[in-house]
Amino acid sequence: MAVVAIDKLTKIYDRGHAPAADNVSLNIAHGELMVLLGPSGCGKTTTLRMVAGLESISSGTVSIDGRIVNQVPAKDRDIAMVFQSYALYPHMSVKDNLAFGLKRRAIDRAEIERRVASVAGILGLAELLGRKPHALSGGQRQRVALGRAIVRDPKVFLFDEPLSNLDAALRVSTRGEISALHRRLGATMIYVTHDQVEAMTMGTRICIMNGGRVAQVGPPLEVYHHPANTFVASFLGNPPMSLLPAVAMDKAGGRCLKVGDSEIELPLNRCPQLQPGSQVTFGIRPEHVAQRPVANGAATPIEAEIVRVEPLGAETIVIARLPGVEKLAFARLAGDAIFPIGERRRLFLDTAMAHVFGSDGLALRPT
Amino acid sequence: MGIFSPSGWKACNGWIFPPQITIISLFQILVQYGLYNSKVGLTLVYVAIQLPLTIYILESFFARIPADLFDAARMDGYSDWEIFWRVALPIALPAVATTVILNFILLWNEFLYAVVLITEESNRTLPLGIQRFIGDTQEDVGMIATGLMIAIIPVIIVYAFFSERLIQGMTAGAVK
């Protein structure tokens, strides 16, 4: 069992400056793969390094299995970490890299050999044990870095953007390998990334961070479909959710949002607490916009001027501007959709899937 | 490390001023401490004049070792001292070899400080010994050539032994 509890964790590098991590609280259950996701400088790596014991803690606590480890040195926390740069010892062979941590722990030589051989077998490194890191490809180095963590059989695995140095194809396959490894080992893992695809595909839960604070924690699809605020809504998804300023209005038979010069009718349950005249943000994901009306789906018409079209083959991303609105809106349409730039076209919104955010940026929850 | 960083600037101080400027003060210091005309005194002077360049080369090399390596070793359970011996130093061997060769070649052939600070026959260094074959009115070219041949043998041996490391040290960082 390895349960990691982070309670009000704060890191201040310079007095007078904003904290790098600000009151971060998070519980990571045994066997969970928690992804810390956010833009550069949001405090995710700082948080991870404090859990690892590589960074001092300004305030708050880190507990592993109920024991507070704030003052416990990194080597005694029974944690292994995979670094963004792989951090392989360049003067040692793959075998020595794998065994380096075990040698320090005075483990029997035969046991070290057995463990190294076992991990090399799992990760397909058996043929490479005699090579030095400079003679390995990027993917092989990444597997050695993974092996170095696995071979120690730690309570908790930490990953600090381990795939960001790999090319796109290798990233996809290594992502699968780490997921498979997580299922196989059933270990507790904390994974830091700025890549939302990694977060969505690998995480048991995602913790989205912004400005040193936790913006939202939850399973990937829940966070995607029910963003807690405009930051989460715009950060997750590519293209991002269209977020347009709007004013609430009452209209016979339901609620209505005035977005620029357009009026968008909303099902009452999407925003029950909305008061007429209040300034809000209307959000809709690109996949909830259609070219033609869909029964029980995208059926609310809206006029928009086509600003840019990005044909991707399987789909076409259309970037449009609603009349009277400065911000752009995104639509993900069929690959064969043809839209002349500059033309005004009618699109259809699935308002049952729309989001409304209050003036403070927080989501107004549907009932 | 830039030339205007603190250690870069200190290293430059050692090169900018011609060695003749320091000779008189060094002579006085060695006399004061009873080290004039001794191998120990000359060795201390050699260490002092070569230290800035040595620190300049070594510091810039050590500073380039990624911090992640030290963090990884710390996670693996090693103390700071063990990390220095088992991780940092082996990685920095090319730089160490570079400084060994540079210092050896420069000091093995050093003449100016030796001729001023050593007068005792028995304490003379090799370049001073070769100088003896040059007289006021004539010089023994054969012996000078022989002396030079003998003098460069250790340099060639050291270079042959460390050259591969030297080249690695000189080109380290040129490619990823």
Image (tube, helix red, strand yellow):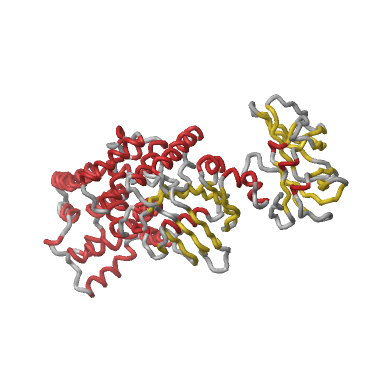
- Residue B8 in view in this figure: no
Residue visible at 47% across and 54% down? A48
- The image quadrant where one finds the N terminus of chain B is bottom left
Q: Quadrant of residue A221?
A: top right
Q: Is residue A30 left or right of residue A334?
A: left
Q: Residue furthest left?
A: B122
Residue A23 in the image, given as x and y percentages of width and height: 55, 62
Residue A69 in the image, given as x and y percentages of width and height: 40, 62
Residue visible at 47% across and 52% down? A29
Q: Nearer the viewer, residue B43 or A321?
A: A321
Residue visible at 51% across and 44% down? A203
Q: Is residue A215 above or below residue A295?
A: below
Q: Nearer the viewer, residue A146 or A187?
A: A187
Residue A36 in the image, given as x and y percentages of width and height: 52, 50
Q: Is residue B71 left or right of residue A29?
A: left
Residue A115 in the image, given as x and y percentages of width and height: 28, 42
Q: Is residue A230 above or below residue B44?
A: above
